[in-house]
Image: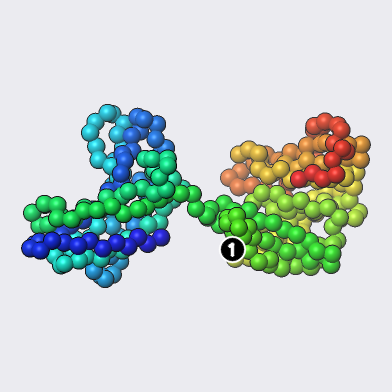
Amino acid sequence: MTLRFTATLPEGVRGPVSAALHLPHRLDGAAGDAEVSDEAVVSTCAVGGVAYGPCPWKWPYNDMGLPFDPPSLALPTAGATATLAYAVTLDADETAVGLGSPDASSAALDVRVELKDGTGAVVAQGPVLLSFVPGTPPARERGTLHARDRSGVLWRYEATGVTSRPFERRKRVGGGWNAYDTMTTLDSPNGALARDAAGVLWKHDVPAVAPAPPFTPKQRLQGDWKRYTALVGTGELGRDRSADLVARDASGQLWLHQGRRRTGPAWNPSLVPDTARTPVGGGWNVYDLLV
């Protein structure tokens, strides 16, 4: 976002005029404040129409009971004129929410702007309103929905992170997906699993390099999966193995197929899932859908 405000200077002010933006409360580590990173907010600043340039934030923490200042942003120095117009960009990460508001009933922070003349005397000051609230998650943290239509075309719906418009417009992945009677998606980087009418389980990996199609050509894993009435990918359940698979048989028994262990510095997606299975429990036929 860009924060814009104008400061009016009294007559006779001599330059250069320095300025700073001060948040209203301190970061007291001893009081259990939420951690705020050293780059919680990254800013560029302009004054008087001069081109934008980087401007530094200070994030002092009190963790020893010593006097300290609240977070502040140093604004560009400018010559003394009747009015000074500032524009500040704010690019905040998720830890900026920890800055919060000193008053739970307040919708915004009363941030104080202070201007000083060449002698260091304060010549103008006043509040601007600013809030740090959770925003839209970055694309890498948003989910994706895949849907197959009656003709066998697979479509991709990418999440927006916005509740009023949860998905982007659909994108066509490709046709021929009606060759499978069951499909399940595994968390990245493990791709998708699909079973054909003969009971053979196939794997579609997620390409390692973008931009690329969502899935690579299929790889054959194993046969004899026709015995199951439902397959559900569980995603990554540990650092030492890839995604697991849960399957229900015709009697209602639930089985866990664990992903194979890591064999080196990278996952080996062609080894998912393992042939060994572990019983989870019976009675799962009371459900008509597993996700």
113 vs 14, left or right, is right
135 is higher (above) or lower (below) than 278: below
Q: Depth check: give the residue in front, 224 or 68.
A: 68
Q: Secondary structure at mark 1?
A: loop
Q: Quick check: 119 left or right of 149?
A: left
Q: Is residue 114 left or right of residue 224?
A: left
Please tell me how many numbered marks the rendered image carries: 1
Residue 50 versus residue 264 in the image, above or below: below
Name the residue rendered at 86%, 31% in the picture.
282
Q: Is residue 264 visible?
A: yes
Q: Quadrant of residue 262?
A: top right
**Which residue is at 86% across, 61% downward?**
179
For image coordinates 20% across by 66% down, the residue present is 83
**Camera-nearest residue between 229 and 244:** 229
Q: Position of residue 104 (x, y in %)?
A: 42, 40
Q: Mark 1 is on which residue type?
A: Ala
Could you tell me which quadrant the C terminus lies in? top right
Q: Position of residue 237 (x, y in %)?
A: 66, 39
Please state which of residues 102 and 227 is positioned toward the viewer in this rendering.
102
Viewer can see residue 73: no
The image's colour scheme reads: rainbow
User: Who's the residue at 28% across and 29% down the image?
Assistant: 64
Q: Which residue is mark 1?
A: 210
Q: Nearer the viewer, residue 217 or 255?
A: 255
Dot 1 crowding, Cα within 10 Å, few <14, some 14–19, many 20+? few
Where on the picture, by quarter, is residue 51? bottom left
Query: Hey, which quadrant is residue 250 in on the image?
Result: top right
The N terminus sits in image quarter: bottom left
Q: Position of residue 222 (x, y in %)?
A: 83, 48
